[in-house]
Amino acid sequence: MSSSHAAYMREWRKKNPEKVRTINRRYYRTHGYGVRAVAGRLASQRYREKHREEGKVYSRQWRKAYPLKQKAQKVRYRGRRSMAVNTLTSEEIRTLFSVGQCFYCGAKDDLTLDHFIPLSRGGNTTRANILVACRSCNASKHDKMPTELLGQLPMFR
Ligand SMILES: [Zn+2]
């Protein structure tokens, strides 16, 4: 059926060039842009894959050049994903980091911004709920409430 149908269509197209054009136009109107958009997406995906290494090097350099900005961006991004209130300003972030040591253990290296009451537990990204913690304290705290930390972090021992 399919081959005879194909042959019939070939004949029909030869005899009705006007109708073929109309159909093609109509198809393009409803599908043309869609098809092009998919092609564009695939092309940009291929581009990203091809340039992934360059992108990694670039973001590594950016992180090194702007460690504070990167940390602020990260904490803001996490805040944005939830329904939490986010009023933390760049100025407040600068003030927080100017303390220069981990709120929990006093370490001076590898400082990150930490939600005292975790976002997942209803905490907000506000000056009052953000403090500076070293990566290791931040990680061991994870999404625990301050009261659950007793005995687990140096300052609560
Ligand atoms: Zn610490």
Image (cartoon, helix red, strand yellow):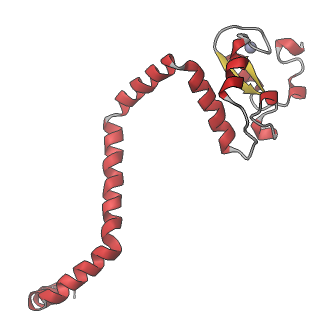
Choose top left, top right, bottom left or bottom right for residue 23. Answer: bottom left
Whether 143 is drawn above or below 62: the answer is below
Residue 52 image point, x, y percent: 37, 33
Q: How many marks?
A: 0
Whether 42 is drawn above or below 57: the answer is below
**Quarter occupied by the C terminus:** top right
Q: Is any part of residue 4 visible from this angle?
A: no
Rendering quadrant holding ligand 1:
top right
Residue 96 image point, x, y percent: 73, 19
Residue 142 image point, x, y percent: 74, 28
Choose top left, top right, bottom left or bottom right for residue 95. Answer: top right
Q: Closest to the observer: 128 or 16?
A: 128
Residue 99 image point, x, y percent: 74, 12
**Quarter occupied by the N terminus:** bottom left
Q: Residue at x 42, y 27 (%)?
A: 56
Apparent side of residue 109 relative to residue 52 in the rendered image (left or right): right
Whether 48 is drawn above or below 13: the answer is above
Q: Residue at x 69, y 30 (%)?
A: 89
Apparent side of residue 31 relative to residue 11 in the rendered image (left or right): right
Q: Closest to the observer: 3 or 79?
A: 79
Q: Closest to the observer: 56 or 94?
A: 94
Q: Is any part of residue 104 visible from this angle?
A: yes
Q: Residue at x 36, y 40 (%)?
A: 48
Apparent side of residue 138 relative to residue 22 in the rendered image (left or right): right
Q: Residue at x 86, y 23 (%)?
A: 149
Choose top left, top right, bottom left or bottom right for residue 148. Answer: top right
